[in-house]
Structures are given as C-alpha cells and as structure tokens.
Amino acid sequence: MLQNKVILGSEEWCAFPELGIPTIKARVDSGAKTSAMHALNIAPFIKNDANWVKFDINPIQNNIKTVIHCEAPLVDKRIVKSSSGFREHRYVIQTSLKIGDTKWPIEMTLTNRDSMGFRMLLGREAMSGRVLVDPEQKYLLGQPTAESLKELYQNSEKAKTGLRIGLLASNPELYSNKRIMEAGEMRGHEMHFLNIKECYMKLDAKKPEIHYRGGTILNEFDAIIPRIRPSITFYGCALTRQFEALKVFVLNSSTAITQSRDKLYSLQLLLNSGIDIPTTGFANSPLDTDNLIKMVGGSPLIVKLLEGTQGKGVVLAETKKAAESVINAFKSLNANILVQEFIKEANGKDIRCFVIDGKVVAAIQREAMPGEFRANIHLGGTASVIKVTAEEKKIAIKAAKAMDLKVAGVDIIRSSKGPLLLEVNSSPGLEGIEGATNKDVAGEMIRAIEKNFKL
C-alpha cells in the first residue's frame, strides 16, 4: 500500500484542471482538516438545476494582476474556524486535484487568503489514503520557474484596474458589511475585509505601518471604509488614524467618528450649527435632579446613557417619581446621562435619512413595536418608505456636515414645533433602509470613494 501513495513535502505545486488552474503553490498541512483555496468575488448560481458557485482567483502569490475566472459544483456552506480562531461561513466546492501524475476528487472551501502565505491549503481530508508527508522536504514533485509560470498564465485575464479598498469592521457576516464588499466587487474594485481585532500598528515617524494577522503589512490601500462598533471605538479610531497617517483615503475620518460617539459633544456641535433638537439637560450631581427634570419640561421624559447604542440605555420615565428613580439609579453607577424632552406627538416614529457625500440617498420611517417608544430596527421596529420634506433633507445634510461625516445615518423626529434632530450615526446599518427602499445604498458608498479618485 505504501508504494501506491504520493510522497509530498510541506510545500508543493499542484493543478486544478476543471477550474482552469494549471499550477498553484500549496501548503501541505496534515494539521488542518479542510482544504482551502483563495477566492474573490464568490457568488452562488444555478446551472442545469444544480447549485454551483463562481469565483475569481489570483493564483500567483503577490500578483493581483493575473486572475482566473472559475466555477464549480457547490457542495455545502459551513462554518470554518481558522488557525487564529476566526470563524466564518465558507462555500464548499468539489473538483479534481492533480499532483504530479496523480489526480483525484477533493472538497475544499473558498476564502480570501490574501493575508496567508499560500493561495492553497491542502488539508488531511483531501490527502487521506493517498498521500504521505515528509515535513522536512519541499517541492518533491518539481517547481515551476518564473518563466514557465509566465507562459502558463499568458492567456489569463488581467484583473480590472479598480481601487484597493479595505472594509475595517468586526463581523464579515453582518448584512451591511457583506453588501459593501459585494457592491465594491461589482464595481470592479479589489475588496478586503479587515477585522479590527486582527490589526496592529507600528508607530514610526519615518515608516508607520499597519500589520494584519500573519504579519501582512496593510500599507497598499487606496481607501478604507471604517465600520466601527461602539464597544471598540477607541481602537477602531486609532487604526483609522494610522491609515490617515499613511495618506489613505477614509470614508469617515477618525475625528468625525470619535465626536459622533460622544452624544453630549455631538449635540453641542449640532446646536452650534443652528440645528434644533429636543430640549436636553445634562448634570453630574444627583442633587440637581429636580431642576434637571423641570429644565426639559417635566415628565414624561427620556433618560439616555451617553454610551448607549441602537436604543439600548434609553429609558422613558412617565412620571416625575419614575424620572427621579431612573436618574438617581444611573448616577449611583457613575454613568453619564442625558435627560431629554419626550415628543409624545411623534407616536413612536422617527425618520432615518441616509446621507452620503452631502446628499440624502435614501430615507425611511421607523415605527416602534406596540407598547414601545424606541423605533430602532434592532429592537423590533418596522421600516417603511417615506417622502421627507425639503426641511428634513436640509437638516440631515446640515447635521452630517456639522459632524464632518461623509456617511451618516441622521435620525429626525416630527414634533409640533417642526422637525427635530435626535442623533447622528457614523456607522448606520444598511439592512432596514435597503430592504424598505430597494436602493443600492452600499453602491452609493462606493461611488463616494470613486468620486474622490475622480473615477
């Protein structure tokens, strides 16, 4: 039996005839269960009533100009945990692997391996019963020269001349992040998802750098789209500042994101720009509670945690006694709070205007669930298309400009005094607004980047 097995080193060159890949360097890793191939622009489709997937690959490491368009039968979609502990959903395909003179069918997952040293990882499931590995050896079955590689790939398509754009975020499976990646790829750009927690920085006056898992240096980007969760604002903005130091275009600046996350400071900036908000109070001492309640017109009123997001940390106090209890409870925790006038006539509804590059590209009305006053989609609120007034558009655009945000979700409430601004969000979600309006909001974000580069 041993003489029938192929002996491989820790690195080998192999081929995938059915995918049109004449040769690709693989890491032979018996410690990995599943095989994986580098893939971009992954998209499932139906072929002859069967599930297939198409994708692009740059088969030569550090060469993004050579691209092969591939398609293969889709076997599965499963969660795979990488060696760094990162979990992601991956498509699984079946195709034929050719190593030396031997060929057999294997399954492998598709993922972006730009940060890895190899475009291909050969795992033990694909080798079981067919291969012996000598980890001290390399290229036991031969190695192509630079000239032969060039000849093998001379007829392959050259990659589109788009921008290299990084999406700086935390969750690649989030609807908003997937749509932004998809929109950029559809417009011919090279998109990379950069997990904030897997980036680290080199602070240097002459040669500042940003490194990614595995030591890859992220200094060759044209643009970065920051999508920073509130819980990691400090580190996410530090990374964004580092990209700015490298002269990379960022869709929202670190300064704009930082000030938008400070609810008190952002309200002060908005008021300085002449934008009306519900009457709001802020105090640091429980001794001021009584006057604080009177200041905003008495109960009912809203109490907000300065650090709250997506409607969390927002409480409606319907009586003066309830208001005093809530305020004093928050104060006993040393929490910073705002006390705000309750706009009863809004009836649990607000308007979300999505502003990109100084224009309102989409707008929805959000309505709270019965018995709830917060209209956030994350809390079960519903979204519907609404025609915003010229005044509401003007407020939304003015608010985004006051916060210096190129991309902003501006929340407005209709009151008996006219439209009032509630909040400006620097990383607004796309699912609710795209689902309700059927507008390509993600595509508008990419267009804003293209406009900066005059594409």
Image (spheres, rainbow, N blue to C red):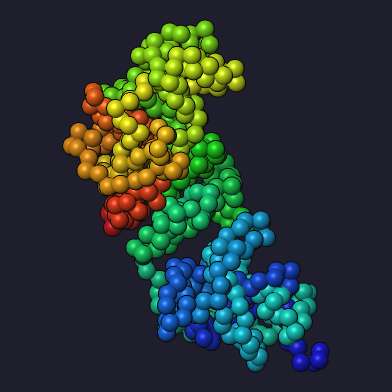
Res 329 → quadrant? top right
Q: Nearer the viewer, residue 84 or 343?
A: 343
Where is residue 403 shown, x and y percent of the image? 35, 32
Quadrant containing the N terminus in the rendered view:
bottom right
The residue sitting at 20% across, 33% down in the picture is 391
> Up-down: is 114 above or below 107?
above
Where is residue 82 shown, x and y percent of the image? 64, 61
Where is residue 266 shown, x and y percent of the image? 39, 27
Q: Could you tell me how many numbered marks the image carries? A: 0
Q: Nearer the viewer, residue 291 or 409?
A: 291
**Residue 318 visible at all:** yes
Q: Residue furthest right?
A: 2
The residue sitting at 42% across, 34% down in the picture is 371
> Up-down: is 67 above or below 316?
below
Q: Nearer the viewer, residue 39 or 383?
A: 383
The residue sitting at 31% across, 33% down in the picture is 412
Q: Is residue 333 left or right of residue 365?
A: right
**Residue 400 visible at all:** no
Q: Is residue 399 left or right of residue 99?
A: left
Q: Is residue 43 left or right of residue 36?
A: left
Quadrant containing the C terminus in the rendered view:
bottom left
The residue sitting at 50% across, 30% down in the picture is 313
> Up-down: is 38 above or below 240?
below
Q: Residue furthest front?
A: 370
Where is residue 101 shown, x and y percent of the image? 65, 92
Res 301 → quadrant? top left
> Up-down: is 381 above or below 269?
below
